[in-house]
Amino acid sequence: MNDLNALHVFLALMQTHSTTRAAQKLGRSQSYVSKVLAQLREDLDDPLFVRTAEGLSPTSYAMSIEPRLRTALDQVTIALEPEEFDPKLLDKITLHIIEPYLITIGKDIIDAIRKETDVVIDIRQWSPLSETMIQEEIVDIGIHILNNKPQTLHQKPLFKGRAHFEGNTDGEYVKYIISGVNEFENRYEMIDPSIETKIYTDNHILTTQLMDTCYTLRYAPDKDQQTDYDIDLTVAIITKASRRQSEKIQWLTKLLVPLIETFEGY
């Protein structure tokens, strides 16, 4: 395994257990990953990964060489790093952001990044896959709420939120569903247990269009501690714990925090 590219492929497969996800992580095609894996199997005379219901499961040999190879790659990476961090040298930035924030400050984030680098920007709505993609280093940073996430993720809390009802309170209540926040919780019941929901949507634009005849629970930062209703929501920056001190993550965090603090609600 003398090819550094092959080393990256092997370690990506160890992390993702999938040729598809490994390809996404590396920014290469699935066929490329499969081709490299086939060559590695031949060179090392070991299958390395066995297909199971959970994905590609590493062999005992693969697990035995993984720590040494990862250490070796880390040493090579450190040796090749420039003495000073320069965002212009980045290849790609990937962000997953909870929908209200993405709608409100997404353009400002892109504009702020563009002032410093012409890097490829992949900015998407937070999804059920976002936590895994941050852990697999496919996503650099997420903006979501502070909650029970794996210890492999680091959460930097920023500020709590408050809530208020908006729209026509004589109409039907609309539950605006936000991924990872309220699929299985009804925070409006903390305020008014008598509310009965008959309309559910995960679309912010549609929710807003319905406000002439319906109403919903809106969220805003509680920066002045003047809470309408406390719904126990704190926005946070989410990163992989082992990456949080990296120069790229530190730079992105400093760029994102003042933009997040401009959010006034939705």
Image (tube, grey):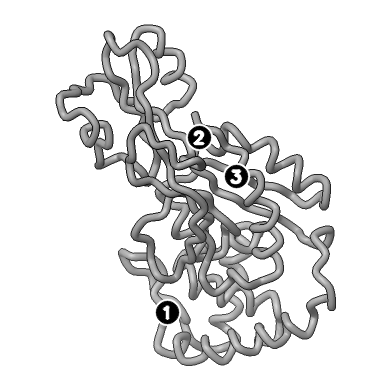
- Mark toward the viewer: 3 or 2: 3
Q: Total number of numbered labels? A: 3
Residue 191 visible somewhere in the drawing: yes
Residue 24 visible somewhere in the drawing: no
Q: Nearer the viewer, residue 130 or 109?
A: 109
Neighbour tally class for label 1: few under 14, some 14-19, many 20 plus, Cα within 10 Å: some
- Upstream in sequence: badge 2 or badge 1: 1
Q: CA distance from mark 2 to mark 1?
A: 40 Å
Q: CA distance from mark 3 to mark 2?
A: 11 Å
What residue is disc 1 on? 58
The residue at the point 59 percent across, 32 percent down is 104
Q: CA distance from mark 1 to mark 3?
A: 40 Å
Neighbour tally class for label 2: few under 14, some 14-19, many 20 plus, Cα within 10 Å: some
Amino acid marked by disc 2: Pro
Amino acid marked by disc 1: Pro
Amino acid marked by disc 3: Ile
What is the secondary structure assignment of the residue under circle 3? Answer: helix
